[in-house]
Amino acid sequence: MSLTVIQRARTSVGDWSNDIHPVLKRVLCARGVKNSDELNHALDQLLPPSELKGIDQAVAVIADAVERQAKIVIVGDFDADGATSTSVAVLALRCMGAMHVGYLVPNRFAYGYGLTPPLVQEAAKQQPQLLITVDNGISSIEGVAAANQLGMQVVVTDHHLPGEQLPDAAAIVNPNQSGCGFRSKQLAGVGVIFYVMVVLRRALLQRDWFARVKIPAPNLAQFLDLVALGTVADVVPLDRNNRILVSQGLARIRAGQCRPGIVALLQLGKRDPLNIISTDLGFAVGPRLNAAGRLEDMSVGIECLLTDDPAKASLLAQQLHDLNQSRKEIEGDMQADAAEALAALAFSETPAGICVFQAHWHQGVIGIVASRLKAQFSRPTIVFAQADDNHIKGSARSVSGVHIRDVLAGVDALHPGLIVSFGGHAMAAGLTLARERFDEFHQAFVGFLAQHYGVEQLSESLYSDGELEPEFLNVDLAQAIRDCLPWGQLCEEPQFQGEFNIVQRQWLGDKHLKLQLSEVVSGKLVDAIAFNQQKINWPLENKRVALLYRLDVNRYQNRRQLQLMVQKHQVL
């Protein structure tokens, strides 16, 4: 095959049951799954909550607030993880008898990220005694201090990497805080608050709370659909603990035990809730939910997830869908602007990093544009937009070999005061600069990358699980892959490589290409589809193609048929 890819190891080791497909054995071993036992995704296989530092202290504070019916306000974030985290906290607390639970999510354009002092002033209008942050708060030093001054207790639940200083909160639950022994550092914000609610239920049982108020102790597994959505949409690595959470949530959705809002969003994304997989949450639901936080206010998304009324859920889901369509149009214009700006630079070779800014760009969409440019250039990328008269905000996306938050920390250490603020993960981060210092930062960012990383680390690698034997090119293996486990970040869905003859081709509109192929060795016929293609890259005179592809099950009129999903191609 002519495509340049890195082949994963093909050896299978460990104790595997005989019903595991031989191709799946080597695929799973290459992803660190050692034996069949690790495919057990029962809830009793979850890591114990006791490993989470601060969880007992946090639960004690929350349980006291529930018992005295204090006013509790959940402070969320404006992305899908934040929306699902907020929904889990609100719904779970209400199910456990808390009568006065509200929520507040900052408008990113007015308040920025996290529990800021201005947001505390906004929260104070609801007169809460307790604030619980979800998917944020670990960097909210000033915001927590402001809440303390106003007499509010604050419990921080978060999963982002902490800085040197922690907020002076009543309790902090974050698997990434120093001294926390929780073995899954990859837990999403919604996973953290789910763990807290599970322990809270146990604590309230021990206090005889449910008997005293004459309500049944709720089954918190009913919220695992939300946990699965937030975990997948936040693109956290799917280690075993996260795979259990996602697998259990998917099982509930397939069984029809699902929030009406998730069902409505799946239907708008043309996904069948009874047959969904993890990527459907990531591609069909997550973007529509995120659109509210990107363009307007995430409260629309949260209300869609909170409601028990299918009709209301459908109306709210349609609003989210319309916002997502607007987001796509804005994104397209910004990508065109970025391409023009980068072309004007006319660099002779791809720089160590991509850094672009336009004052008129939409602040809510810069993260998506950064992702697109990162994929196009295979380099860490930061896209900036105007924040106010004096500042710009950037959204960074990175390649697998570069921890982008560590890069920003390195630049900050070498150039004190250049970055006003920053935070994030290995693969994504955000930052604020003074507008007049963009060029200075651009030079420092690219220079740091060039000095500390080689070309291989800076580039996004293509991985393959090797060539697939012709006898395994069938719908049964495709179904086995779908059913095996939730695929996602650091547990990527299998990709195979091979050469095929093009038998037939049909363009669906101007962007998608439907193909009938024959495998060059066996002559076996198979259907394939390539999304978002350009006709110039598929010249009619070329009859043979090298593919990097995934296996998919195409369901049509109650029939299952194998379909290859083309990831990359090279005409031969």
Image (tube, rainbow, N blue to C red):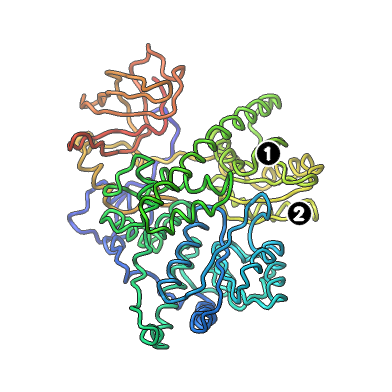
Residue occupying the point 37% across, 24% down: 513
Instruction: List x then y, in percent, for residue 193.
Output: 48, 68
Q: Quadrant of residue 222?
A: bottom left
Residue 404 percent location from the top left of the image: 62, 50
Mark positioned earlier in the residue sequence (1 or 2): 1
13 up-or-down from 455: above or below: below
- Asked if residue 315 is positioned above or below residue 173 in the image, the reply reads above
Q: Quadrant of residue 337?
A: top right
Q: Is residue 186 visible?
A: no
**Mark 1 — residue?**
355
Q: Position of residue 395 (x, y in %)?
A: 63, 46
What quarter of the picture does the C terminus occupy? top left
User: Which residue appears at 38% of the width and 33% of the height?
Assistant: 548
Q: Nearer the viewer, mark 1 or mark 2?
A: 2
Establish if 412 lies above or below 460: below
Q: Quadrant of the N terminus?
A: top left
Give the residue drawn at x 35%, y 78%: 217
Disc 2 marks a residue whose amino acid type is: Val
Q: Secondary structure at mark 1?
A: strand
Q: Is residue 457 among the parts visible in the rendering?
A: yes
Q: Nearer the viewer, residue 379 or 209?
A: 209
Give the quadrant of residue 560: top left
Name above or below for residue 173 compared with residue 253.
below
Q: CA distance from mark 1 to mark 2?
A: 17 Å
Residue designated by label 2: 420
In the figure, is residue 534 to the left or right of 427? left
Residue at the (24%, 35%) spot, across then down: 562
Decide: few, some or many residues near mark 2? Use Cα within 10 Å; few <14, some 14-19, many ≥20: some
Q: Is residue 108 left or right of residue 266?
A: right
Q: Please tell me whether mark 2 sits on a helix, a strand or a loop.
A: strand
Kind of residue at disc 1:
Cys
